[in-house]
Image (tube, rainbow, N blue to C red):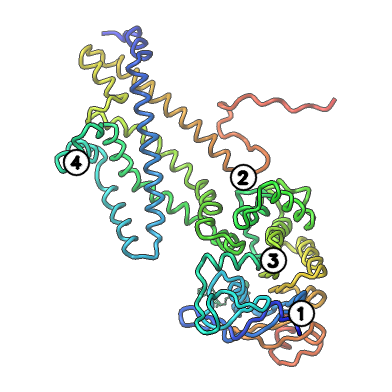
Amino acid sequence: MKTPPLLEVQNLHKSYNNVEVLGGVDFTVQRGQVKALLGPSGSGKSTILRMISLLEPCDSGTILLDGEQIGVIGGRVDVRPAPERILARQRTAIGMVFQKFNLFPHLDATRNVMSGLTTVLKVPKKEAREQALEMLDRVGLAARAHAYPSELSGGQQQRVAIARALVMKPKLMLFDEPTSALDPELVREVLDVMEKLASDGMTMVVVTHEMRFARSVASEVALFDSGQIVEQAPPDRFFDAPEHERTRRFLAHMH
Amino acid sequence: MEFDSTIFFDQLLSEAYVRGALLSLGLAVASQAGAVVIGFGLALGKSSKFAAVRSVCTGYIWFFRAIPALLLLLLMWNGLPQLSPVFQREWYSPFLAAFIGLALAEGAFMAEIIRSALMRVDDGQQLAARALGMTRTQVLFKVVLPQATRVALPPTGNEFIGMVKYTSLASVISLQELLTTAQMGVAVTFRYAEYYAAATVYYLVIVSVLMLLQNRIERRFTWTSTPTKRRFPALSRPQTPEKVPA
Ligand SMILES: Nc1ncnc2c1ncn2[C@@H]1O[C@H](COP(=O)(O)OP(=O)(O)OP(=O)(O)O)[C@@H](O)[C@H]1O
Ligand SMILES: [Mg+2]
């Protein structure tokens, strides 16, 4: 029997004030794959990540993580939105990295990484600290373990943010333009960490404008426009032989 | 009549003044703490999803900002017992009446301070915390509140100092705090200058200590790994000079 895809998004709809932002989005991400989402500003890329990470409810559609529908409770017949307590628990399986890092400024790097472990998973302090230090080492920041966010460069902050999400051992990592707020010379160190993560087999959905990263790391690239997926294909085909006129125009614009 | 420093120092060191000062300070601490709790509740209530809760909080703030604190204390001490026999019992002391009155009034002001501090915390903070799986309560207490506290500290310190002075209003309801102590002495000796000067010294000492304390607490909220420069260099302890390499 074939294992289900790690993430399956089916017919996702979302409107804000009667303006449709997502108009029936479908896509799947296989275990260990990296999906790059491209698209113009305002096309709904951040919105779809907020739906998958359960930070906001969708209007309709289903999200299956590892074959199980998330964001809802109940069986096939009476499906209801899950209460906040259940959503909070389900969110721990999904790591999220934001464009503006959103580190907690009142905690140093170690305690930022520990916060989910101690507060949510109730891991004892000592053990949480060890795991946090290990994770900081993995993103190359063992030496800055006691620095506060205000004392770190943007690239370092984003790596701490990645460590903070990773330490929860999520099944899936979501990245929303993780390098867009960085000075050009700091982009590389963050992409390197993500690349290593991908080669370690993490399943990832990455919203990005980094074409080189999408081409070299993604297993599949999708173009998002006006709340719909226009085209999705493996990177070679997507970049070198796009099927849709919209994709060609988008790519021409990016170069 | 000359300023008699013997009278002044006698009073300054007298048990009555020390007790009065402690009572003033105790009342200020209790009332301010009460006001912070009330203000926090009101601040949360004002952003409640229930319109009724929001308007109750708005009404509270409107009412208690308008009423003069002096009037409120008189109402608490003289008015309440007339309305309900519960307040005629022994447990209802001038201290309690003053505490309730001052906390209620100050709560309205703390509400605005705490509310604007909560709103100053970046929205990305709660998103990141919720994405980690924190519940709304955990987000509030672990992430939002520590950051709002930093914003609220300086204005709260200000309010607290104001509160120390407001406790002198409790002299009208016969609480033997600092000002009452001075007034009672003056009533028999007519040595206004000496008795009032002694009270002044106590207020100065209390407020100075509180300012130092506030400064220390604010420094804990700088969120850096290296200690930052003190704001009052003259008041700081001498720092050990850096070692000069030979
Ligand atoms: N909370 C909200 N309330 C109202 N409208 C919203 C909200 N969030 C997003 N939108 C609207 O939805 C649309 C899609 O927004 P979204 O942030 O998902 O775009 P995006 O593709 O991430 O764009 P960008 O590249 O600029 O980040 C935009 O038109 C935006 O104005
Ligand atoms: Mg976006």
Q: Residues within 10 Å of mark 4 (few under 14, many from 20)?
A: some
Q: CA distance from mark 1 to mark 3?
A: 34 Å
In this rendering, position of residue A184 left or right of residue B125: right
Q: Which mark is residue B80?
A: 4
Chain to which mark 2 belongs: B
Indicate the chain on which mark 3 is placed.
Answer: A
Q: Are marks 3 and 2 on the same chain?
A: no
Parent chain of label 1: A
Camera-side mark, 2 or 1: 2
Write the residue at 62% across / 86% down: A228
Question: Circle 2 is placed at which residue position?
Answer: B223
Q: Quadrant of ligand 2?
A: bottom right
What amino acid is labelled 4 in the image? Leu
* Label 2 element class: loop
Which numbered disc covers residue A170?
A: 3
Helix, strand or loop under label 3 = loop
- Figure check: A215 above or below A103: below
The answer to whether the residue labelled 1 contacts the one labelled 3, judged by CB atoms less than 8 Å apart, is no
Query: Gap between marks 2 and 1, in whole Å?
Result: 42 Å
Q: Which residue is mark 1?
A: A255
Q: Secondary structure at mark 1?
A: loop
Both on one chain, marks 1 and 4?
no
Question: Residue flagged by tag 1: what amino acid is it?
Answer: His
Q: Earlier in the sequence, mark 1 or mark 3?
A: 3
Image quadrant where one finds the C terminus of chain A: bottom right
Using the image, name the chain to which the residue with label 4 belongs.
B
